[in-house]
Image (spheres, grey):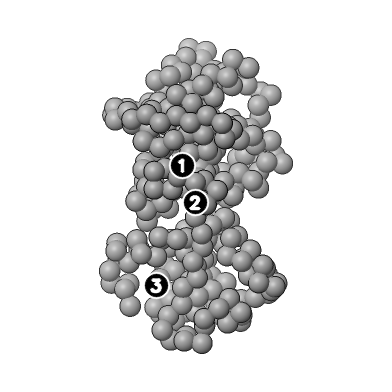
Amino acid sequence: MFSHRSYSIFQCRRHRLPQWLWASMVLAILLLLSPFSVSAGGNADVKVPLDERSIGQEEAILSPAEAAMSAVPPNGRPLVRFGFLKPMLAYGENNYQPGETDIRRPLVAHLRRMMPDVHFQFVEYELPALSEAVKRHEVDYALMSAGQYVELRSYGAYALATVYTARFPDPNRFTAALFVTTADHPEIQTIADMKGARAVFNSQANFINYQLPLAAIANAGFNPDRFFFKQHFTNDKPQEVLRLLLERKADIGVFRVCEYETLIAKWPQLKQ
């Protein structure tokens, strides 16, 4: 799995793939031509320019329903399903983080070129659905956040590589959560001051947006399950977090770092 911004490539159901295919996949990942670096097991780094070749129809990223309708590989080629976490629309079709490099399309094109004898299915899942696909062993490899990978290790996920970018060179310090309130609440200055407030998050399954901030609340000595008076979720629409704050339907909004500033730049009407 690729962790975002520390993204990791991981493999699951290893026992169902031939050993040569598993080894070839690792080699292909390590030879990935990209503007980011791939660290394999923390030991090897690859830093080479991005291949800008166009993406053809075969490299399309499918929905789970589309993948199910085209599950039989042509010409007897082995089928490998690669699961992608679906980016939030606020960031664009292929980017997981504002201002970051598109890491999905170059990876798709590279694996097609390096392993032409393998029939890949690149399938994108909503965050909870990707977890369920891993648990049911419906994907062979996947690209997801480091936090989601950690949760899935007990289901057979095995880390192959971690990607880090020039902007964020240390995958161990790649992101954080941000609590935001409005000028209507000058009394809120600390985590303790937020107790009993109404909070809004992108998704309950989101590692950075939900689990990290609740961990901070727990580390401050509070029960995170009983801390807020009410929790809202926007189904991964971070601009809705801002809207609910401005409409006074929530007291606290939670973002990943850089997300708040990016949303304000994209929707300046929300800058209040």
For this orientation, the residue located farthest to the top is 75
Q: Residue 245's x, y, as percent?
A: 43, 76
Number of residues whose C-alpha sits closer than 10 Å to that of mark 1, classed few (under 14), some (14–19) or many (20 or more): many
Mark 3 residue type: Arg
Q: Which residue is drawn at 58% across and 76% down?
A: 191
Q: Quadrant of residue 204?
A: bottom right
Q: How far apart are marks 3 and 2 (CA)?
A: 27 Å
Q: Residue 6's x, y, as percent?
A: 50, 45
Residue 75 disc label:
none
Q: Distance between the residues labelled 3 and 1?
A: 32 Å
Identify whether 151 is placed above or below 28.
Answer: below
Contact between labelled residues 2 and 3, with CB atoms less than 8 Å apart: no
**Residue where numbered disc 1 is placed:** 164
**Residue where numbered disc 2 is placed:** 174
Q: Is residue 141 visible?
A: no
Mark 2 residue element: loop
**Residue where numbered disc 3 is placed:** 243
Q: Distance between the residues labelled 1 and 2?
A: 9 Å
Mark 1 residue element: strand
- Judge depth for marks 3 and 2 and give the one in front: 2
Q: Which residue is drawn at 62% across and 39% down?
A: 134
Check the picture and name the quadrant holding the N terminus: top right
Number of residues whose C-alpha sits closer than 10 Å to that of mark 3, classed few (under 14), some (14–19) or many (20 or more): some
Q: Residue 173's x, y, as percent?
A: 52, 52
Mark 2 residue type: Phe
Q: In which quarter of the image is residue 133?
A: top right
Of the pair 254 and 123, the residue shown nearer to us: 254
Q: Residue at x 61, y 44 (%)?
A: 149
Identify whether 93 is placed above or below 76.
Answer: below
How many labels, in total? 3
Q: Which of marks 3 and 1 is nearer the N terminus?
A: 1
Contact between labelled residues 2 and 1, with CB atoms less than 8 Å apart: yes
